[in-house]
């Protein structure tokens, strides 16, 4: 019987402390009350005179254990303090499993290119003329679709260029005619005439490659459409 009376208090005290470990710090009064009852019972196993001492001793031990080992939620966000990586979250703020507010969505602003130049080198015209060929029109059809999407806010500047074959005056006039020929076709395909703010010929004055080679001259024969948004 003495073995039972010795072991029983240890078993009951261990059970009380184990139960308190799962509670929150704010539940320490509950721990104390339960511990007091159990303590009184433990004291009574010795004698009725020990019941009060047992209640005080075990109740105090249980309350202290609950306060030290209990898992609280001081900011009231529903996440225990032991897992709360963002303590002090303001009341009412939605938090994740770690007790932290979800990151604000990143809003990326669209980057608008204010100025862009479309270089057309695949429009060759008829030899020594400003007349568009069927293949030229196929190329410009794609350009027209693109430019119609830019209207009506974009301003278009069209410049014709030639290589150095021929006189400066002749190339100047030819480049101007070709620039206007391109613009008129684009307008026929639905690009607003009001979008074109300038249509000029630069002749051979602005080469981008060496006119001494066939490849260089081909690069210099071009029409440029500058888009200003």
Image (cartoon, rainbow, N blue to C red):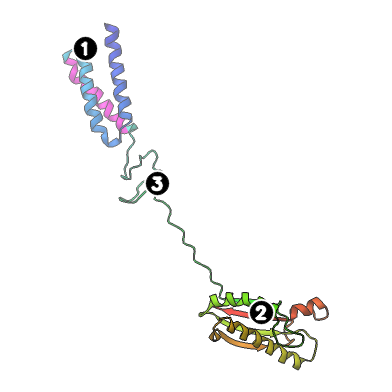
Give coordinates of residue 48: x percent, y percent.
Answer: 16, 14
| Rendered-image quadrant of the C terminus | bottom right
Spatial CA span between label 3 and label 1: 51 Å
51 w.r.t. 128: above or below: above
Q: Residues within 10 Å of mark 1 (few under 14, many from 20)?
A: few
Q: What residue do we see at 20% from left, 20% from top?
A: 40
Identify the disc placed on residue 46. 1
Identify the disc placed on residue 130. none
Secondary element at image label 2? helix
Q: Quadrant of residue 129?
A: bottom right
Residue beneath disc 2: 137
Give coordinates of residue 122: x percent, y percent.
Answer: 71, 76
Residue beneath disc 3: 96
Extent of the magenta region: 49-67
Residue occupying the far top of the picture: 1
Secondary element at image label 1? helix
Spatial CA span between label 2 and label 1: 110 Å
Mark 2 vs 1, N-terminal side: 1
Q: Nearer the viewer, residue 45 or 152?
A: 152
Q: What residue do we see at 29% from left, 24% from top?
A: 16
Q: What residue do we see at 31% from left, 43% from top?
A: 74
């Amino acid at each position: 019987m003495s073995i039972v009376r010795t072991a029983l208090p240890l078993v009951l005290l261990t059970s009380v402390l184990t139960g308190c470990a799962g509670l929150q710090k704010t539940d320490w009064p509950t721990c104390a009350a339960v511990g007091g009852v159990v303590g009184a019972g433990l004291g009574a196993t010795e004698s009725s005179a020990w019941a009060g001492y047992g209640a005080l001793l075990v109740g105090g031990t249980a309350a202290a254990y609950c306060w030290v080992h209990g898992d609280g939620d001081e900011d009231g966000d529903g996440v225990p303090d032991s897992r709360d990586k963002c303590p002090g979250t303001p009341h009412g703020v939605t938090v994740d499993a770690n007790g932290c507010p979800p990151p604000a969505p990143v809003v990326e602003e669209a980057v608008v290119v204010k100025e862009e130049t479309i270089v057309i080198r695949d429009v060759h015209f008829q030899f020594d003329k400003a007349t568009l060929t069927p293949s030229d029109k196929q190329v410009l059809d794609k350009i027209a679709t693109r430019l119609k999407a830019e209207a009506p806010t974009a301003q278009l500047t069209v410049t014709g260029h030639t290589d150095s074959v021929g006189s400066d005056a002749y190339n100047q006039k030819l480049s101007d005619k070709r620039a206007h020929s391109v613009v008129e076709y684009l307008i026929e395909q639905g690009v607003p005439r009001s979008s074109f703010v300038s249509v000029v010929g630069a002749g051979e004055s602005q080469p981008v490659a060496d006119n001494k080679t066939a490849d260089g001259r081909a690069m210099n024969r071009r029409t440029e459409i500058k888009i200003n948004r």
